[in-house]
């Protein structure tokens, strides 16, 4: 059985996307630039954002593509390049990336996992929303501003005390 998102039109997948510099805070420093890049791509290549958290140097997201569409890779490529083009050139760029005309902001690849059942989806949404606590950025999930947890609370899906110990 194939578990790669690229082979499942209309699939739901969870992604982890990392910056090349894992000590950077670029994503939260430029959160509006990232939002703009994602919004632009979603208009041209729709997808449903089910959950997301943006940390300083990586992000996690769960997307569902429209029926008949399996091109997650195109969307990530466009988001990463749109974000990168909007930033000043200050990062270190390896010779191999320079030769290809690439920036040194993102890691080339991303981790992906196809969601297969409702329990898997629920576990990954919880993982994403708890991630800022796991990494020590905040004590409570609701304290992290760059998370869809806040939308889940607003819609009454979870309570304001979600994830508190």
Image (cartoon, rainbow, N blue to C red):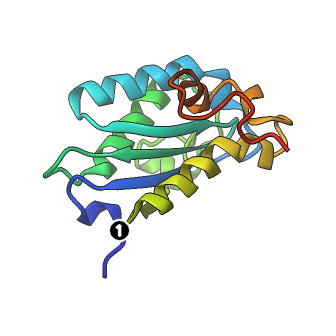
What residue do we see at 54% from left, 25% from top?
A: 151
Q: Is residue 162 above or below residue 109?
A: above
Q: Is residue 55 left or right of residue 71?
A: right
Relative to the observer, which residue lies in front, 105 or 59? 59
The residue shown at (73%, 37%) is 24
> Percent x, y for residue 12?
35, 53
Residue 13 appears left or right of 24: left
Residue 48: image location, x then y, percent: 33, 37
Between 160 and 132, the residue placed more toward the observer is 160
Residue 59 point in image, percent of width and height: 59, 42
Relative to residue 47, is residue 123 drawn left or right? right
Report the residue at 60% width, 25% height from top: 150
Q: Residue furthest bottom?
A: 1
Indicate the secondary structure of the residue bearing disc 1. Answer: loop
Is residue 1 placed above or below 21 in the rendered structure?
below
Rendering quarter of residue 147? top right
- Measured from the top left, where is residue 56 in percent x and y? 70, 35
Residue 122 appearing in the image: yes
| Residue 159 drawn above or below residue 33 | below
Along the line of sight, the residue nearer the viewer: 70 or 152: 152
Q: Is residue 109 visible?
A: no
């Amino acid at each position: 059985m194939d578990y790669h998102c690229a082979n499942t039109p209309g699939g739901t997948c969870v992604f982890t996307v990392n910056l090349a510099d894992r000590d950077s805070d670029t994503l939260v420093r430029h959160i509006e630039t990232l939002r703009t890049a994602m919004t632009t791509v979603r208009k041209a290549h729709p997808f449903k954002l089910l959950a997301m958290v943006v940390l300083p140097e990586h992000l996690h997201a769960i997307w569902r593509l429209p029926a008949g569409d399996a091109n997650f890779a195109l969307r990530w490529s466009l988001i990463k390049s749109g974000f990168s083009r909007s930033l000043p050139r200050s990062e270190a760029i390896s010779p191999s990336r320079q030769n290809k005309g690439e920036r040194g902001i993102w890691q080339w690849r991303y981790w992906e996992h196809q969601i297969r059942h409702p329990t898997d989806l629920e576990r990954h949404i919880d993982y994403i929303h708890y991630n800022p606590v796991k990494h020590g950025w905040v004590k409570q999930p609701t304290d992290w501003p760059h998370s869809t947890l806040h939308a889940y609370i607003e819609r009454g899906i979870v309570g304001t005390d979600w994830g508190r110990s």
